[in-house]
Image (cartoon, rainbow, N blue to C red):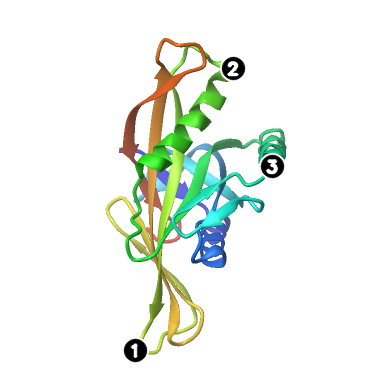
Amino acid sequence: MDDIVIERSCFVGLVASAVEAYNRETNGFLVGNRRTRLVRQRPREVTVLRAAYPLQTEDRKPNWVSHGNEKAFKRARGAIENLDVGYAVLGGFHSHTGDDGAASLSPTDLDYVTDELRRLSRDRPEERVQWLEVVMALKRRAWSRRHEIGWTARQYRRKLGCSVALDATHGYDMTIGGFWVEGEPDGVPGSWDVVGTREARLLLPWNQ
């Protein structure tokens, strides 16, 4: 099972981006690297997510999000990929809103990831490549019992949970899942197929 450690600053960026855009979907890039970390008191090689960069010029709807300004999207992607800070673009994130949203990949999500895999493969046309997509299922809540303002995180077997109280009786509940998507050439130049997805285990370093 793959372990993905989400640093505090990245986690706050994910949560704030999803809450800000509600009830429309949000999306962006995930930046990080591979490192050895203590996981349940044992050193393991894991993927560490360092930052979540939300895209600001997207076309957002309650049940989908797309590149509203393609030139702006390419500028943001190029800026992130060329920053020499020791990290790489590992994938992306997006939210699912409303009562029917789930922290899982939809067929539309996989179409989007396929486009990203095709872009990643330009320098490695014969290799299998992979993309990490983090999905946040977000629901608005009105609580009858008063809550303390702030946020709390929960650890599930693979996913993460988070409650955000904006005031004593209103806030959001969120479930977060992470998925590695693998692709490979399908024999036609420039054409790629998704050949596998697997769910990773998401971890918060302060919540183990």
Indicate the position of residue 153 as horizontal and vertical percent values.
40, 66
Between discs 3 and 2, the one toward the N terminus: 3
Task: Say which residue label 3 marks.
Answer: 76
Three-letter code for the amino acid on which mark 1 is drawn: Ser
Q: Quick check: marks 1 and 2 in contact, CB under 8 Å?
A: no
Q: Secondary structure at mark 3?
A: helix
| Quarter of the image where the C terminus is located | bottom left
Three-letter code for the amino acid on which mark 3 is drawn: Ala
Q: Secondary structure at mark 1?
A: loop
Q: Secondary structure at mark 2?
A: helix
Which residue is more in the foreground, 13 or 20? 20
The quadrant in which residue 46 appears is top left
Task: Say which residue label 1 marks.
Answer: 144
Indicate the position of residue 11 as horizontal and vertical percent values.
51, 57
Q: Give the Cα separation between the discs numbered 1 and 2.
A: 55 Å
**Tag of residue 123:** 2
**Tag of residue 126:** none
Residue 43 visible here? no
Q: Give the Cα separation between the discs numbered 3 and 2.
A: 20 Å
Q: Is residue 120 left or right of residue 176?
A: right
Three-letter code for the amino acid on which mark 2 is drawn: Asp
The residue at 66%/34% (across/down) is 81
Relative to 163, residue 100 above or below: above
Between discs 1 and 3, the one toward the N terminus: 3
Indicate the position of residue 134 as horizontal and vertical percent values.
44, 47
Which residue is more in the foreground, 80 or 86? 80
